[in-house]
Image (cartoon, grey):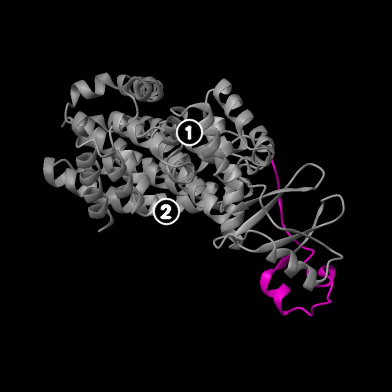
């Protein structure tokens, strides 16, 4: 239903633009939900975007930029004159404005920051010092901080004087005179407290926080684990400098999931999409195909060791790919579960022993069942009982190897502080190919007299 609304709106926008009625096109977009408006805007050709975006008022333009993907938002913002861009950034949340500035060319970002309102620029400038994928890059400096000696009545009066955001999670953080984070007060606790009760007496001193340099994936895991709607961020001295809101983490989870999925497929750039420029896609994807080519030659070299055996029993060439292929599938299953477990913090290096035993056990069960099935199939198909025995044993061994490789490779990469998802698929497939070919052809060589009868 939402897509139908967007498609209908796009038709109306294009018709209005063709008739030269830009204001009418803008009115159509204005009637859409902000998320739908961003999707519709993204579907417009670049020339139509450039015609519409500068005509938006700063508040609407800011709302649109906050909904667009990072690269699209930066492209749209970069098309504005410096003064107009500064006006739009003044209407944005400080963290969102900092993200836009961080994606623009340095000179353009510097010029826009210089023309922003003094108060907004003061909030945004410190955020630019932090990498986008850290707690400092995610946080907003807009939060409510109370003093421990305030009364509940004073705190409520303070809140009444603020411009409250309806969607904000109202955790009220408590700081000392040096802005060190010392506690947190829930809005409900504040309302039901006696008017003269001190904040110090109703706050919870066991408040959790993260340093500004904390990786965004760790932040996401922490907020997911405890179900928090917001998480305070502190500097090296323990001073409260910002707050990360739950809606920022939704994008982080999507981004990290995309990154892990791409890396399991040997795509190193999580920002790539189906519509990325061809040159960029090739430059990011080709290197891993070259690496895969090298590992394929390694597997081929294992096969070449048994050329004499294959020459005597050409039938072996038909079945060797079954053993390697099934082992690769099993390894990919184990690998996907291990990478997910590592990403979610379910598996640590100390768990390697138990995880290994578990996956080897599963590999034995899978290998026994699949091995018997394929052995019977080979026997019935070709009428050679020994061939069925060889392929069944090779399948059993390769399934165990798949479990070992799928467990050890990502955990080893993690131990060396490398991304477990990045190279795991190549390494695990190499192991299962080499072991599968080696076991099948090695056993065939051993039982060669029985195969050539």
Residue 386 appears anywhere in the view: no
**Could you tell whether 177 is left or right of 442 in the image?**
right
Dividing the picture into quadrants, the one containing residue 386 is top left
Dividing the picture into quadrants, the one containing residue 429 is top left
- Residue in the image at 39% along x and 32% along y: 272
Q: Tell me the quarter of the image containing the C terminus.
A: top left
Chain-order first, disc 1 or disc 2 = 2
What element does badge 2 sit on? helix
Dividing the picture into quadrants, the one containing residue 201 is bottom right
Q: Tell me the quarter of the image containing the N terminus.
A: bottom left
Q: Is residue 305 above or below residue 240?
A: above
Q: Give the labeled residue for mark 1.
A: 422
Q: Residues within 10 Å of mark 1 (few under 14, many from 20)?
A: many
Q: Position of residue 217 (x, y in %)?
A: 57, 45
Q: Is residue 105 above or below residue 170?
A: above
Q: Nearer the viewer, mark 1 or mark 2?
A: 1
Q: Write down the region rendered in magenta.
A: 185-212
Alpha-carbon distance for marks 1 and 2? 25 Å
- Residue in the image at 49% along x and 49% along y: 253
């Amino acid at each position: 239903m939402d897509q139908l609304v967007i498609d209908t709106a796009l038709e109306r926008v294009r018709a209005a633009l063709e008739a030269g009625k830009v204001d009418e096109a803008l009115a159509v977009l204005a009637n859409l939900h902000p998320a739908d408006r961003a999707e519709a805007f993204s579907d417009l050709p670049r020339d139509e975007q450039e015609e519409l975006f500068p005509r938006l008022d700063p508040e609407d333009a800011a709302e649109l930029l906050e909904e667009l993907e990072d690269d699209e938002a930066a492209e749209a913002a970069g098309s504005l004159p410096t003064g107009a861009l500064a006006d739009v950034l003044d209407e944005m949340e400080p963290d969102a404005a900092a993200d836009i500035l961080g994606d623009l060319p340095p000179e353009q970002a510097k010029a826009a920051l210089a023309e922003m309102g003094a108060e907004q620029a003061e909030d945004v400038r410190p955020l630019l010092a932090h990498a986008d994928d850290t707690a400092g890059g995610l946080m907003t400096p807009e939060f409510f901080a109370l003093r421990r000696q305030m009364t509940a009545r004073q705190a409520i009066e303070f809140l009444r004087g603020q411009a409250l955001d309806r969607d904000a999670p109202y955790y009220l953080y408590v700081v000392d005179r040096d802005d060190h984070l010392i506690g947190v007060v829930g809005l409900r606790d504040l309302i039901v407290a006696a008017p003269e009760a001190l904040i110090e007496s109703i706050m919870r001193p066991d408040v959790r926080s993260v340093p500004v340099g904390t990786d965004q994936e760790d932040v996401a895991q922490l907020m997911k684990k405890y179900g928090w709607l917001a998480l305070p961020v502190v500097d090296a001295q323990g001073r409260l400098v910002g707050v990360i809101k739950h809606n920022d983490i939704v994008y982080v989870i999507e981004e990290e999931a995309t990154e892990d999925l791409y890396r399991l497929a040997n795509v190193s750039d999580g920002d790539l999409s189906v519509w990325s420029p061809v040159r960029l896609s090739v430059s990011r994807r080709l290197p891993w195909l070259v690496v895969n080519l090298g590992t394929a030659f390694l597997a081929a070299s294992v096969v070449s060791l048994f050329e004499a055996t294959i020459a005597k029993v050409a039938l072996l060439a038909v079945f060797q790919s079954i053993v390697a292929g099934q082992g690769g599938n099993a390894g990919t299953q184990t690998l996907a579960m291990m990478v997910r477990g590592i990403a979610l913090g379910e598996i640590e290096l100390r768990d390697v022993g138990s995880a290994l035993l578990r996956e080897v056990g599963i590999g034995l069960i899978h290998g026994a069942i699949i091995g018997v099935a394929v052995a019977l199939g080979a026997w019935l198909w070709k009428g050679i009982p020994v061939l069925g025995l060889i392929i069944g044993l090779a399948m059993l061994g390769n399934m165990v190897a798949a479990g070992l490789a799928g467990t050890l490779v990502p955990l080893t990469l993690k131990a060396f502080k490398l991304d477990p998802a990045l190279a795991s698929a190549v390494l695990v497939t190499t192991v299962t190919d080499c072991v599968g070919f080696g076991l099948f052809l090695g056993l065939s060589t051993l039982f060669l007299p029985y195969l050539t009868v």
